[in-house]
Amino acid sequence: MWGKWIGCEVPEGGRGRFSDAQRAWAAIGDQPGLVGQVGGWDGGCARVLGLWADEEAYGRFMRERHDAVVAASGQGGTYTAIVVGAGEVVLQMAGDAVDPRDALETAALLRVADCRIRPGRAGHFMDVQREVWAPGMAAAGGMLGGVVTRLDPQRYLVTTLWSGAAAHERYAAEQLPALRERAAVTDDLQALTGHLLPLEPAWTVLPVDR
């Protein structure tokens, strides 16, 4: 798979206009290779996670559809700044959902860990994702599924979809402290930025062939 992470700074009072424009992305539900797209508010920033079958499908969408949707929705005029990262999904994490599309469809909460990796530690970081975090979160009730996306050689995005805030709060209280200790997080990370987004149902885009 291929992942895309978008952050848009939206001016105060502009949420309604941005949300109206974001709904226009439902038009890409028929795009070949779309796995799904979700998003929500993080303070004054709108954040969106998109997943595609592979880089080729994502590239085709960018060439054929992306600019037309932006133009038709007028979304370019609803934010003051945008930051975009994209890259290969290097790990899929199992959860309560059957597959990533089901996780995107049923999730109410998105947890994102934006990880900057110390030089030479990427291999260990991925080992820890596979051996500690993935099974640990899969055992937590309410974690529907997730992916690790490599945005560049030193930056990895760990995204997990949850059934709701209560499930994530329970995990954070009961499992997270022990998992952090086992993972020895500070050995691998130069910096970690976390985001916890209640998802906006109207922003969810799923393939129309489901």
Image: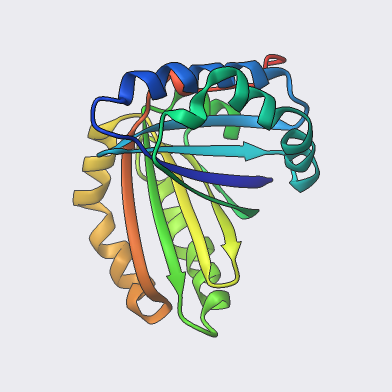
Residue that sits furthest to the bottom in the current view = 120
The answer to whether residue 24 shows anywhere in this view is: yes
The answer to whether residue 103 shows anywhere in this view is: no
Closest to the observer, 15 or 144: 15
Q: Quadrant of the N terminus?
A: top right
**Picture layout, residue 149 above or below residue 120:** above
User: Residue 173, how many percent across, how many down?
Assistant: 19, 50
User: Residue 163, how many percent across, how many down?
Assistant: 36, 29
Q: How is the image coloured?
A: rainbow
Q: Which of the 4 image quarters holds residue 142?
A: top left
**Picture layout, residue 85 above or below residue 42:** below
User: Residue 116, how many percent across, how many down?
Assistant: 44, 70
Give left or right: position of 210 versus 120. right
Give left or right: position of 133 versus 10. right
Number of marks in the image? 0
Please tell me which residue is depicted at 78% across the width and 38% down the height of the picture. 57
Give left or right: position of 102 versus 29. left
Closest to the observer, 87 or 96: 87
Please tell me which residue is depicted at 59% across the width and 60% down the height of the picture. 150
Residue that sits furthest to the left in the current view = 173
Closest to the observer, 134 or 28: 28
Q: Quadrant of the C terminus?
A: top right
User: Residue 118, how many percent across, how many down?
Assistant: 46, 80
Please tell me which residue is depicted at 67% across the width and 31% down the height of the picture. 67
Q: Which of the 4 image quarters holds residue 9?
A: top left
Q: Which of the 4 image quarters holds residue 149?
A: bottom right
